[in-house]
Image (spheres, rainbow, N blue to C red):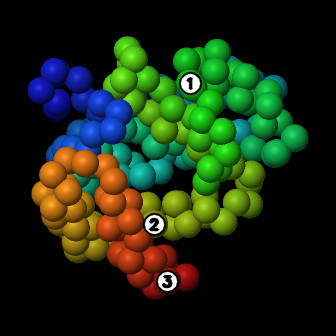
C-alpha cells in the first residue's frame, strides 16, 4: 500500500516500485466490467497487462490494460473511455488513454489495439512468461528495483533500461 493509503496511483513524472498488491487484480476486474458495460454492443477483449498483472511481482502502482477491438470501432470506444474518465493521449503503441485521480495521480494506462496487433501480442507473451517462471519474475523485479535506484526515482530511462531483458524473454518465448 502507498503512503497515502491507496493501492493504485502514482504522481505523473515520478517513478516508484511497490510490492505486489492482490487488490490490483480486483481493481482490474472492476475496470474491465466498466469498460465492457460502456460499449455493450461491441465485442471487446480486455486484458490485464504489465507488472500489476503478474502475481508476486513488484510494480509501478498503475494498472495497465489492453483493449482489443476492430479498428472500425476505435472512435466509438474512445468516446466511451472519455466518458469513463480517461484522457485520450492519441496514437502511440496502441492508442493510449490514461486515467487520473485528481490532477496528477495516474492510476490507469489503457492501450487500444487491433485484435492482431503485434505489440499487444508481445505484451501478453511477456506477461505470461513472467507468470509461468518464478525465477524470471524475480530477475525482472530485481532489474526494476536496480533501475529505480540508479535513476533516483526519475522516469526517464526506466523503460529503456528494461528493453534488453524484455527482448530476451520475448525471443525465448517465441
Q: Does the residue at mark 3 contact the one at mark 2 (Cβ under 8 Å)?
A: no
Position in image of residue 70 (x %, y %): 81, 45
Residue 80 position (above or below residue 9) = above
Left or right? Give the position of 137 relative to 50: left
Earlier-in-chain disc, 3 versus 2: 2
Q: In percent of the image, x 59 and y 41: which residue is there? A: 96
Q: In percent of the image, x 45 and y 77: which residue is there? A: 167
Position in image of residue 130 (x %, y %): 36, 66
**In the image shown, does 42 or 150 lie closer to the viewer?**
150
Earlier-in-chain disc, 1 versus 3: 1
Q: Nearer the viewer, mark 1 or mark 3?
A: 1
Q: Secondary structure at mark 3?
A: helix
- Crowding at dot 1, Cα within 10 Å, few <14 / some 14-19 / many 20+, comes out as some
Whole-angstrom CA distance, mark 3 to mark 2, is 10 Å
Q: Which mark is residue 126?
A: 2
Q: In percent of the image, x 60 and y 35: which residue is there? A: 89
Q: Quadrant of residue 6?
A: top left
**Tag count in the figure?**
3
Q: Does residue 67 appear anywhere in the picture?
A: no
Q: Nearer the viewer, mark 2 or mark 1?
A: 1
Q: In percent of the image, x 78 and y 37: which residue is there? A: 74
Earlier-in-chain disc, 2 versus 1: 1
Q: Which mark is residue 86?
A: 1
Left or right? Give the position of 20 relative to 109: left
Which quarter of the image is occupied by the C terminus?
bottom right
Q: Does residue 38 appear anywhere in the picture?
A: yes
Whole-angstrom CA distance, mark 1 to mark 3, is 33 Å
Position in image of residue 142 (x %, y %): 17, 66
**Which residue is identified by label 3?**
171
- Crowding at dot 2, Cα within 10 Å, few <14 / some 14-19 / many 20+, comes out as many
Position in image of residue 49 (x %, y %): 47, 50
Amino acid at each position: 500500500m502507498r503512503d497515502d493509503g491507496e493501492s493504485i496511483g502514482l504522481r505523473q513524472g515520478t517513478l516508484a516500485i511497490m510490492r505486489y498488491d492482490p487488490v490490483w487484480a480486483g481493481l482490474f476486474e472492476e475496470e474491465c466490467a466498466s469498460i465492457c458495460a460502456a460499449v455493450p454492443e461491441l465485442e471487446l477483449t480486455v486484458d490485464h497487462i504489465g507488472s500489476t498483472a503478474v502475481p508476486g511481482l513488484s510494480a509501478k502502482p498503475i494498472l495497465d490494460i489492453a483493449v482489443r477491438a476492430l479498428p472500425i470501432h476505435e472512435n466509438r470506444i474512445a468516446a466511451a473511455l472519455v466518458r469513463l474518465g480517461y484522457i485520450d493521449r492519441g496514437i502511440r503503441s496502441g492508442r493510449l488513454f490514461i486515467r487520473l485521480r485528481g490532477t496528477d495521480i495516474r492510476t490507469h494506462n489503457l492501450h487500444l489495439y487491433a485484435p492482431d496487433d503485434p505489440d499487444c501480442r508481445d505484451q501478453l507473451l511477456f506477461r505470461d512468461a513472467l507468470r509461468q517462471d518464478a525465477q524470471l519474475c524475480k530477475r525482472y523485479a530485481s532489474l526494476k528495483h536496480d533501475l529505480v535506484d540508479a535513476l533516483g526515482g526519475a522516469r526517464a530511462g526506466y523503460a529503456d533500461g528494461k528493453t534488453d531483458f524484455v527482448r530476451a524473454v520475448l525471443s525465448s518465448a517465441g
